[in-house]
Image (cartoon, helix red, strand yellow):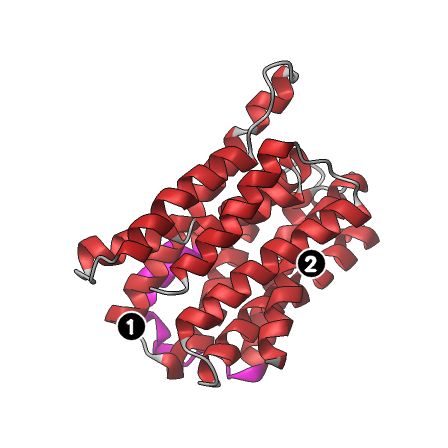
Amino acid sequence: MIYLILCIVSSSLLFVIFKVVGRLNLNIFPVIVINYIIAALLGFSIDHFPPPGVMKEPWFVMALVIGVLFIWMFFVIAMTTQKAGIAVTSVASKMSVIIPISFSILYFQETVTLFKLAGIFLAVVSVVLTIYKKGDDTPVSRRALLLPVILFFGAGLIDSLIKYTQETYIGNDNAIMFTSVLFTIAAISGIVIIPFKRNVIKIFTDSKTIVAGIILGVVNFGSLYGLIKALDSRVYDSSIVFGINNIGIVLLSLFFALIMFTERLSLVNKIGVTLSIITIILLSKV
């Protein structure tokens, strides 16, 4: 249970950190790059650095694709948190689980159950209600609503690719190595872009940026490491672990949003959040 708590708290803190970074007007790009460097180093410290032949591993091409997507989606999460709020971001990211579930049904021909169908339908409805804004909102607010939609599909795509890779190429024994390689590729992807950025030295030597990147990296790794260890513990079925984890993240993120940042949700948004929790419970039964 301690690892599951670690995952829930760490995942919720990711949204909080992105919100604080926005409040401090820090450049989010270097923060994300530093974050992945730290997360990769932590992963390799627990397992070991990849062997020279890691590029010949059957899962390496998928790791390359997912790693590149990682850094872009982390940027989307940051922007969504800052523009649309923590509550909306957490629901959009957690409800994206319906995409890998749908992928599993279509590709792996998993059994279609009433819980799955109801969960998929409610997930779509809950996301729509959670991000709903009244028609008199400013144009900026309306444009910002595209971010959780992009996050919803982007996170779902990444989860689907990870599921495919795990089912096809890797097992639990290689999970941390695979994850560490993903973090490394994400970091390299960001480093490659650095020369095209203005004031590179200045933004990467800013003390607040470095501290924010380190904290984000530790929290980011903690969320994934906690989930892996919770699944490895075999105390609960994986469906129960994912269900408790997602519910915990949505609720704790909502708590942070209301208490720390006084975010306000309309009645429609609250209904959406409630539906998202019901959806997660349903999907944990599949």
Q: Is residue 84 above or below residue 247?
A: above
Identify residue for label 1. Answer: 56
Taking the spot 63% from the left edge, 44% from the top edge, the residue there is: 87
Identify residue for label 2. Answer: 13
Question: Residue 112's quadrant in the figure?
Answer: bottom left
Q: Nearer the viewer, residue 153 or 131?
A: 131
Q: Is residue 218 visible?
A: yes
* Horizontal side, residue 192 vs residue 61: left or right: right
Q: Residue 39: x percent and y percent?
A: 60, 67
Question: Residue 64's quadrant in the figure?
Answer: bottom left
Q: Amino acid at mark 2?
A: Leu
Taking the spot 44% from the left edge, 57% from the top edge, the residue there is: 67
Give the structural element (helix, strand or loop) at label 2: helix
Q: Which residues are magenta?
A: 46-67
Q: Nearer the viewer, residue 232 or 206?
A: 232
Number of marks drawn: 2
Q: Earlier along the polypeptide chain: callout 1 or callout 2?
A: 2
Q: Residues within 10 Å of mark 2 (few under 14, many from 20)?
A: many
Taking the spot 41% from the left edge, 54% from the top edge, the residue there is: 97
* Quarter the C terminus occupies: bottom left
